[in-house]
Image (tube, rainbow, N blue to C red):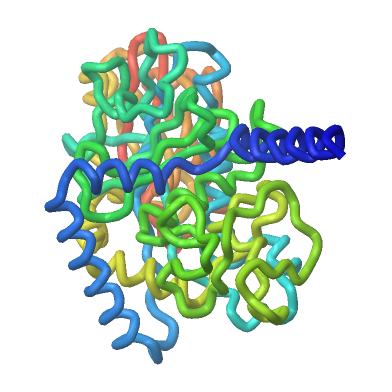
């Protein structure tokens, strides 16, 4: 009997250790620490919650709204080449967000049938910024080399003086820091109401996007989907704390069942009842606000959508007036810029480019859309005095940025494609 008891104790201890070692989101811990240190923040958060409840109630019967686009800046803070993730990996994360927040992800079909009526197109999308805080053109990505090997879950990554990168204004940008996050964290975010210098999302570089050298369990970009939902004022399904053993805590959302704790891994047993007594009240373990592996998280609910839209019409409303998606002023090299001719502009598709004033250089040509995605490239083109035509007729009507890069420097100008 004594031997059996020892085995049982060891088993319980090993299970607890396994859970303790699970990678997880740090939002609840971070928010609780800030609230404990700043009583005024507690009052601010109470006001935000009161506004959220009123807004959700007053807009309960709203039909479709205009889709909201949130400008994003990604701060890559790296020590090694692996941590300095590619532009393509970053764009893959933006693509994931735009699928997940519009319910366009293919795996949404895996939602259990009892909840399919609750699945939400959140009518929120994301794009990399095209204008930096100084009004200049940007691709929405900053890169900062650091001497810090592991940030230990610290907010120091948000400060240039600490080896990280200062936030861009949180009223105009959703700041995302990608780094070697450490401390057993996948990522974390702060909910609305906190200090602007801290505001935003931090993600480990091995959990960001869906291409590149990624963790086997967190390789589809769902960590960022989860953390941005915190930024938009969602809690975990078990509430704002670390556990909900008594089933009394709530996430403030009417259509997400209560549950006691996070679900890890990939739960395929439905229903999984920890607080509920019927299948409709099962743990919603496929919801983005649980802790499952990326390939087992599929959806937001209509109630979660309402809370996020309340944030965007309340404490995060300033970002709706951001001009960060309007391409900024361009032209890095004065000689190239003053010599560059583009015509016709606007164009129906065929654009001629020439470098005047005796500038003679082989130039790479790149055209970007307003989200910062490259839509056209040509390499080693000689633009000296002769007209060079590029065919952009397959692009949709809109504003684009043409960039020239050469050994002599670089320059950019806006071009407009019309029908």
For residue 261, side relative to residue 157 (left or right): right
Residue 258 visible in the shown view: yes
Q: Quadrant of residue 45?
A: bottom left
Q: Nearer the viewer, residue 406 or 110?
A: 110
Q: Nearer the viewer, residue 198 or 78?
A: 198
165 vs 88: above or below:
above
**Residue 299: x %, y % from top left:** 60, 65
Q: Nearer the viewer, residue 178 or 384?
A: 178
What residue is at 49 percent from the left and 36 percent from the top? Answer: 389
Quarter of the rendering occupied by the C terminus:
bottom left
**Residue 322: x %, y % from top left:** 23, 54
For residue 339, side relative to residue 360 (left or right): left
Q: Nearer the viewer, residue 21 or 92?
A: 21
314 vs 32: above or below:
below
How many marks the image carries: the answer is 0
For residue 283, side relative to residue 387 (left or right): right
Residue 339 visible in the shown view: no
* Residue closest to the far bottom: 61
What residue is at 72 percent from the left and 34 percent from the top? Answer: 14
* Residue closest to the far front: 1
For residue 362, side relative to residue 166 (left or right): right
**Residue 413: x %, y % from top left:** 31, 36
What residue is at 43 percent from the left and 64 percent from the top? Answer: 124
391 vs 381: above or below:
below
302 vs 387: above or below:
below
**Residue 59: x %, y % from top left:** 33, 86
Quarter of the rendering occupied by the N terminus:
top right
What residue is at 50 percent from the left and 43 percent from the top? Answer: 25
């Amino acid at each position: 009997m004594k031997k059996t008891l020892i085995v049982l104790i060891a088993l319980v201890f090993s299970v607890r250790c396994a859970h303790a070692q699970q990678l997880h989101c740090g939002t609840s811990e971070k928010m609780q620490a800030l609230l404990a240190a700043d009583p005024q923040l507690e009052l601010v958060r109470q006001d935000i919650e009161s506004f959220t409840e009123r807004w959700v109630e007053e807009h309960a019967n709203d039909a479709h709204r205009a889709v909201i686009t949130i400008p994003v800046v990604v701060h890559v803070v790296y020590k090694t080449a692996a941590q300095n993730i590619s532009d393509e990996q970053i764009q893959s994360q933006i693509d994931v967000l735009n699928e997940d927040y519009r319910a366009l992800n293919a795996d949404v079909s895996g939602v259990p049938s009892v909840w399919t009526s609750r699945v939400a197109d959140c009518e929120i999308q994301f794009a990399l910024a095209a204008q930096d805080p100084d009004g200049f053109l940007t691709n929405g990505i900053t890169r900062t080399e650091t001497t810090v090997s592991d940030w230990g879950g610290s907010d120091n990554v948000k400060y240039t003086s600490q080896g990280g990168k200062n936030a861009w204004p949180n009223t105009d940008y959703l700041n995302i820091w990608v780094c070697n996050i450490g401390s057993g964290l996948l990522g974390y975010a702060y909910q609305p109401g906190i200090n602007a210098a801290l505001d935003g999302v931090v993600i480990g570089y091995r959990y960001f996007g869906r291409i590149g050298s990624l963790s086997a369990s967190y390789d589809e970009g769902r960590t960022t989907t989860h953390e941005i939902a915190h930024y938009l004022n969602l809690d975990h399904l078990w509430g704002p704390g670390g556990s909900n053993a008594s089933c009394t805590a709530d996430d403030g959302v009417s259509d997400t069942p209560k549950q006691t704790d996070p679900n890890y891994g990939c739960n395929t047993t439905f229903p999984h009842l920890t607080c509920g007594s019927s299948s409709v009240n099962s743990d919603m373990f496929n919801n983005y606000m649980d802790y499952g592996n990326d390939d087992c998280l599929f959806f937001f609910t209509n109630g979660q959508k309402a809370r996020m839209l309340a944030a965007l019409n309340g404490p995060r409303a300033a970002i709706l007036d951001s001009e960060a998606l309007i391409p900024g002023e361009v032209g890095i090299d004065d000689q190239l810029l003053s010599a560059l001719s583009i015509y016709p502009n606007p164009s129906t598709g065929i654009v001629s480019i020439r470098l005047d004033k005796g500038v003679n250089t082989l130039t790479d040509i790149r055209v970007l859309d307003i989200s910062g995605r490259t839509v056209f490239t040509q390499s080693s083109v000689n633009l000296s005095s002769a007209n060079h035509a590029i065919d952009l007729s397959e692009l949709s009507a809109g504003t684009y940025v043409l960039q020239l890069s050469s050994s002599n420097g670089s320059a950019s100008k806006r071009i407009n494609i019309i029908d």
